[in-house]
Image: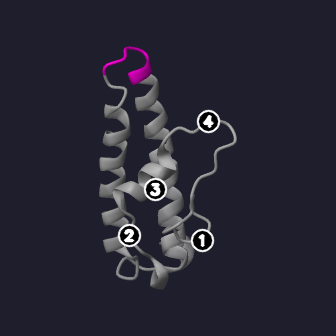
Amino acid sequence: GKDHGLDARAIPWRPICTTTIAGLAARAAVNVTVSYIPGVAAAANAATAVALTQFIGRYVDEACAHPEDARPLGVKDVIERIRPRRAGQDVAPAGVPDGVT
């Protein structure tokens, strides 16, 4: 909030919290698909932790930059953004504030 000149009351907490909870559920959903494959599970766990942390950081930054436009994202939206991709696959930006992918 401080980087964008917001005090604690002006930060869009509801969409940030809702999106963070959806992010945790999305990470669990992505990880469960490989949880029984040794080695792959550890790599997927690490990759989704990094991806979710980066995603939430960008989301919060964008939400604070434009608090009036902040919208919560659902589990499906977050999964589309943190799921590991093959080379050449794009991330769908639908439902995410401008600049957050």
- Label 3 packing within 10 angstroms: few (<14), some (14-19), many (20+): some
User: Which of the two discs, 3 and 4, sits closer to the camera?
Assistant: 4
The reply to whether the C-beta atoms of the residues labelled 3 and 4 are less than 8 Å apart is no
* Mark-to-mark CA distance, 3 and 4: 22 Å
Label 1, on which residue?
98
Residue 55 screen position, x and y as percent: 50, 53
State the residue at coordinates (36%, 34%): 31
Compared to residue 53, the image places residue 8 above or below, namely below
- Label 2 packing within 10 angstroms: few (<14), some (14-19), many (20+): many
* Mark-to-mark CA distance, 1 and 2: 13 Å
Q: Amino acid at mark 1?
A: Asp
The reply to whether the C-beta atoms of the residues labelled 1 and 2 are less than 8 Å apart is no
Residue 92 screen position, x and y as percent: 57, 58
Q: Amino acid at mark 4?
A: Arg
Label 2, on which residue?
72
User: Which of the two discs, 3 and 2, sits closer to the camera?
Assistant: 2
Q: Give the SS element for disc 1.
A: loop
Label 3, on which residue?
56
Q: Is residue 85 magenta?
A: no
